Amino acid sequence: MTKTSLVESVLKEACALTDASWAARVAYSANGWHLLESHRLSKKRALVLHDFLENKSNSAWLGGALTGGHSRSRACIFAEDSCKMYVYPALGGDEWLFIVSMKESSTKESQRIWRLASMLICNAALDVTNQTSELMRAVSELEETQQELRARIAAQREAESRLVQAAKLAAVGEMAAGVAHELNNPLTSVVGFTELSLDALPSDSQVRADLELVLREAIRARSVVRRLLDFARQREVMRVRADINEIVDDVVTLTKHLLLTSSVELRLQLSPGLPWVLIDRNQIKQVVINLVNNALYAMPQGGVLSIQTDTVVRHGVSYLALAVRDNGIGIQPENLGRIFEPFFTTRGDKGGTGLGLSVTYGIITEHGGVIEVESQFNAGSAFTVLLPLEPLHES
């Protein structure tokens, strides 16, 4: 119930309980007194009341009742037979009065009812204000709680997804390490003896072309084995404080010629003054190279490659962000969830092994980071690496 409807209801009930012929609530403002709600107040009576409120002496009389906090009465201005006009001030700070017309023989009980009515309106108004304030505060707290819950659910789902992917990589990594060690030695022997045989053969030998094919395939197989070893991370990790922008510059220097020959425009957006992170420089450099190579493969006809570094905050944690974007062929939606799986590749006919992104994912996960991907088929892809920032303690 609103304050206006509550006042109208009180006026009606109080008039019914007493011998009041009409009642109204008036309020004081900088412009003087004005009528708010009323009951049984005809147009004629309203005009007379309006003139009464406009009169300065009457206004002072009403103001005395308001500031004094006591009811007042005087002869009724409506020339009604044997009637008096009573005023009942608000209790609680509101700048208003009840004006009531009752018979001169009105009982003290009737006057008490109107005093109680005035108190009821003041208390109800305060209750409505307090309830509204409490309701708004509760709604605000509920919205904050809902947002926090959504953020926690999103973080939990993200953590579960990373955990499942890490479990897959761990299982395949154990197998890869064993397979790689078993294959590495015989492949080294094949490459070595093939090279010796080629050196011993004359240039016009009929088997020379066959041996050269054996050598090329053996070298390619050895490259796959080395990637398996990288994937299994069977090597010592050396972490130091490093500047991510310097690593990006090194990769750009290494791939500059490849970018030019591929008709790819490079756009660097490296934020200056970034905090250093505790990383294995060689591993993170391999990550950047893998992402750049993937971008180049995605733009066979040329395009734009963008590399950006910055700091971001996710779920209350500060990260150093490295984003690699291209406007190439993108990733088909059905493949987007599998790109980090070991040996999954869409470039099998072009020599792809499906280990580049798996190795990248493993390196970032080992660093306590996150790698995100956004892609739209035939519109490009964006890989974002997030490495957690730690405070650099000066010695």
Image (cartoon, rainbow, N blue to C red):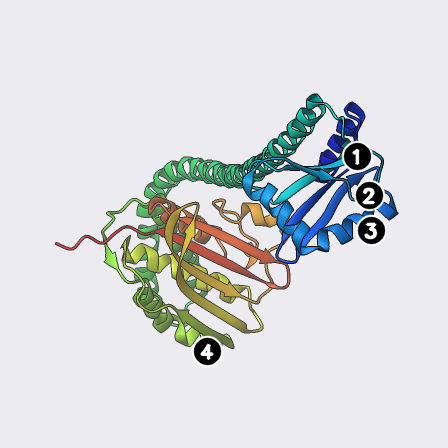
Q: Which mark is residue 83?
A: 1
Compared to residue 87, the image places residue 387 above or below, namely: below
Which residue: 46% across, 74% down? 266
Per the image, label 4 sits on a secondary structure element best described as helix
Q: Which residue is mark 2?
A: 78
User: Mark 3 or mark 1: which comes first in sequence?
Assistant: 3
Q: Amino acid at mark 1?
A: Cys
Residue 392 place in picture, x, y as percent: 22, 54
- Location of the C terminus by quadrant is bottom left
CA separation in Å, label 4 and label 1: 103 Å
Residue 106 place in picture, x, y as percent: 75, 26
CA separation in Å, label 2 and label 3: 11 Å
Q: Say whether marks 3 and 1 touch (CB < 8 Å).
A: no
Compared to residue 138, the image places residue 219 above or below, namely: below
Q: Which residue is mark 4?
A: 260
User: Mark 2 or mark 3: which comes first in sequence?
Assistant: 3
Front in this rendered view, residue 351 or 267: 267
- Is 324 placed left or right of 298 in the picture? left
Q: Say whether marks 2 and 1 touch (CB < 8 Å).
A: yes
Q: Say whether marks 4 and 1 touch (CB < 8 Å).
A: no
Q: Amino acid at mark 4?
A: Leu
Q: Residues within 10 Å of mark 3 (few under 14, many from 20)?
A: few
Q: Which residue is mark 3?
A: 47
CA separation in Å, label 4 and label 2: 99 Å
Which residue: 55% across, 40% down? 68
Which mark is in front, 4 or 2? 2
